[in-house]
């Protein structure tokens, strides 16, 4: 290297590299936090209907299953499934079904359905997650959202989640 020439590795290059790496790490941490954050559902703000009545949650915890009644036998399989927690089955197509001892079938208006899908980032059907009561009619998501591959295996899968 000649006298008076600049070094290839200068202090500004070092600082720029450090600053760039810190920005990338910060962005990664922020988006990782935002996507892993669990959401809340307020049943006073979002109205779901059972048969003709407005659904009012009465249990401390629920297994929420978002499904499509266009898949044959789905509602029948959900009504026969026995789990340690009650099932809150939300139908994408808003069909009316009779509740069973362990499954409550609910439906909602278009706005509520779209808000629900967007809030919980539901991309596939059937999907499942848990909610638990925090106060009054406010419930907090208590698990990640999982895609169900086979509703017949729901009771086996629920024990592994």
Image (tube, rainbow, N blue to C red):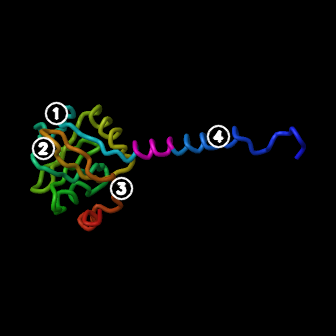
Q: Which residue is mark 2?
A: 57
- Earlier sequence position, callout 1 versus callout 3: 1
Viewer-nearest residue: 152 or 30: 30
- Earlier sequence position, callout 2 versus callout 3: 2
Q: CA distance from mark 4 to mark 1?
A: 52 Å
- Earlier sequence position, callout 3 versus callout 4: 4
Q: CA distance from mark 3 to mark 4?
A: 44 Å
Q: Which residue is mark 4?
A: 15
x and y percentages locating residue 59 in the rendered image? 11, 49
Camera-near label (4 vs 1) is 4
Is disc 4 surrounded by few (<14), some (14 to 19) or many (20+) residues within 10 Å? few
- Earlier sequence position, callout 1 versus callout 2: 1
Q: Which residue is mark 1?
A: 44
User: Start and end of the magenta stretch?
Assistant: 26-34
Q: CA distance from mark 1 to mark 3?
A: 27 Å
Return the residue found at the far front.
Answer: 3
Camera-near label (3 vs 4) is 4
Viewer-nearest residue: 63 or 110: 63
* Contact, mark 1 vs mark 3 (Cβ under 8 Å): no
x and y percentages locating residue 46 in the rendered image? 21, 34
Q: Is residue 57 left or right of residue 140?
A: left
Marker disc for residue 147 = 3
């Amino acid at each position: 290297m000649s006298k008076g020439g600049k070094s290839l590795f200068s202090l500004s290059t070092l600082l720029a590299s450090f600053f760039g790496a810190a920005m990338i790490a910060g962005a990664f941490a922020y988006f990782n936090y935002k996507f892993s954050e669990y959401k809340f559902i307020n049943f006073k703000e979002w109205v779901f209907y059972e048969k003709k009545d407005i659904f009012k949650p009465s249990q401390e915890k629920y297994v929420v299953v978002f499904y499509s009644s266009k898949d044959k036998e789905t509602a029948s399989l959900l009504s026969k499934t026995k789990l340690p927690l009650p099932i809150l089955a939300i139908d994408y197509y808003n069909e009316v079904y009779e509740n069973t001892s362990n499954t409550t079938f609910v439906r909602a208006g278009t706005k509520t359905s779209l808000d629900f899908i967007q809030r919980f980032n539901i991309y596939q059907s059937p999907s499942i997650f848990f909610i638990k009561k925090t106060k009054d009619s406010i419930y907090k998501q208590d698990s990640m959202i999982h895609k169900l591959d086979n509703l017949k295996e729901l009771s086996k899968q629920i024990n592994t989640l």
